[in-house]
Amino acid sequence: MVKLTVVARVTDGLPLAEGLDDGRDMPDADFYKQQAKALFKNLSRGQNQPSRMSIETGPYIFHYIIEGHVCYLTMCDRAYPKKLSFQYLEDIKNEFERVYGNQIETAARPYAFIKFDTFMQKTKKLYQDTRTQRNISKLNDELYEVHQIMTRNVQEVLGVGEKLDQVSQMSSRLTSESRVYAEKAKDLNRQALIRKWAPVAVVLGVVFLLLWVRKKFW
């Protein structure tokens, strides 16, 4: 059974549409929605992720399709057929591209296309019962194969992103510290120059003052 569906822009992870009724029958829905956001953030880093992937998380499994800089993601029960999950996403993708294709890049706020929920809910209902003749036909469709789509664990996928974050944070910290050290080195050099030349400046100042007084009054 389909539990959650989200459409997001890959370049920045901005959520564009989401099923409004998704997760209402799940006590831990917020936890999995946060995982979905973390997956989008992971994809927005520009890593070479497959255009189709399945990601196991607890009793559920995420499936996603990336096309045209947009990620179409759904979360289903693990027992729900993988082939139906991806065919459901294909239907979502095709309609979203048809309706909003020329507006995706200019969307500036989260859930700019929330009205797409109507199509999501209608399509989800068509896929809920795997025993209908329609869905049995889709399962028997030999032209649509999903066996080669990679399946990974959510900790494994998000762990790569966390490591990259740590490296990025460490790099930023080292850059910041190097700037601080450079500023301190400049200050020390200035102080050393002042200590070195200050007595000479004082002596020269006294000499010039005496010469001026001598010239003025003598």
Image: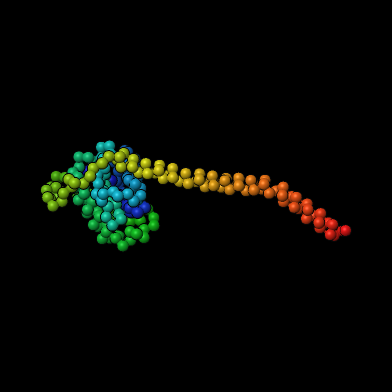
Residue at the outermost bottom position: 102
State the image quarter where residue 147 is shown.
top left
Query: Is there any visible trace of residue 186 in the rendered image?
Result: yes
Tell me where residue 26 appears, x and y as whole percent: 29, 40
The one of 95 and 170 positioned closer to us in this rendering? 170
Tell me where residue 164 appears, x and y as whole percent: 37, 44
> Quick check: 121 above or below 77?
below
* On-image quarter of the C terminus: bottom right
Residue at x 54%, y 44% (from the top left corner): 181
> Quick check: 27 above or below 102?
above
Residue at x 11%, y 48% (from the top left corner): 140
Residue at the outermost right position: 218
The one of 185 and 100 positioned closer to us in this rendering? 185
Tell me where residue 36 appears, x and y as whole percent: 32, 45
The one of 45 and 1 positioned closer to us in this rendering? 45
Residue at x 30%, y 55% (from the top left corner): 69
Residue at x 19%, y 45% (from the top left corner): 82
> Quick check: 184 above or below 9?
above
State left or right for residue 202 relative to residue 192.
right
Which colouring convention does the figure follow? rainbow
The one of 115 and 187 positioned closer to us in this rendering? 187
State left or right for residue 141 relative to residue 156.
left
Tell me where residue 95 appears, x and y as whole percent: 24, 57
Query: Is there any visible trace of residue 121 in the rendered image?
Result: no
* On-image quarter of the N terminus: top left
